[in-house]
Image: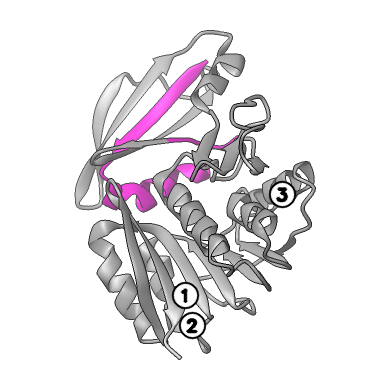
Amino acid sequence: MIRLAVRCRPELAERVLGELVGLAPNGLEEASGEGWVEYALYGPPGEIPTIGELEAAAGDGTVEVSTTEIPDDWGDRWKDFHRAVTIGHRLVVRPSWDEAGREEAPWSVVVDPGQAFGTGAHATTRMCLELLLELADRGAARGALTDLGTGSGVLAIAAAKLGWEPVAGFDHERAALEAAADNARANGIALELGRVNLREELPELAPTVVANLTAPLLGEVAGRLELAPERMVCSGLLVAEAEQVEEALAARGLVVCERRVSGDWAALLMRDRA
């Protein structure tokens, strides 16, 4: 089995991801560190080219591309990279094979990696979960919630467990909606799921909105907001992009309650200024 990895600067991540998604019907592995994001896909020799290590152009920057041969038991060993993530000592997001934290935490969300993103391990997902948990602590987990770009459904499922109802998740990728439906069933949660291209339209929004999207897409969402939600949790943006997103949402009647940072990534909690 061949592992092809593409490593880039965070500001190039959206472009690199867009190029790779079509090549990865079984999903992509994502990892990040200080100043870098890496996407990897797996396949047999012949389907994945063996190219060693090289640098390739990507817009105004370069990416590092590498291929490595991995052992035949990779189908089991890859699970070692996906472990339970604990948020605020009370919310655990875990794959089905990892029981860590299940008994100690009041809330447990089971999400298996697959053809959609969102296992709780990425900083942007973690920060959204932290903000949702803190909103629940303040008694704000009530009424309806909309999850824009739901991916694996992890944020929508967590919100439903924390008390929001009904919860609706929207995504443009059919694979994401299928994964979200599967994960919702595994957690005993009823989600309303819909296919929407956020670059072209917005669904009807609930009083609480969570949007783990890229900064350009968050800007497009802001441009289509006709009525500001009561509160909005946003992430998926780089620290350097946070001010621009804040300004776009402020023009639609939202003000910043909190800006949170983890490494290169930022998250925002916004509220209706009215």
Q: Is 27 positioned to the left or the right of 212 in the image? A: right
Residue type at mark 1: give it: Val
- Residue identified by numbered label 2: 224
**Residue 224 position within the rendered picture, expressed as x and y whole percent measured from the top left:** 49, 83
Mark 3 → mark 1, Cα distance in angstroms: 23 Å
- Mark 3 and mark 1 lie on one chain; the one further toward the N terminus is 3
Asked if residue 53 is among those painted magenta in the image, a careful observer would answer no
Q: Secondary structure at mark 3?
A: helix
Q: Nearer the viewer, residue 248 or 24?
A: 248
Please give the label number shown on residue 221.
1
**What is the distance, in whole Å, between disc 2 and disc 1 at their CAs?**
5 Å
Query: Mark 2 touching mark 1, by CB under 8 A?
Result: yes
Q: Residue at x 42, y 46 (%)?
A: 17
- The amino acid beneath tag 3 is Glu
The residue at which mark 3 appears reads as 178
Indicate the amino acid at tag 2: Arg
Query: In screen coordinates, is 64 left or right of 86?
Result: left
Which segment did they paint magenta? 1-30
- The image quarter containing residue 162 is bottom right
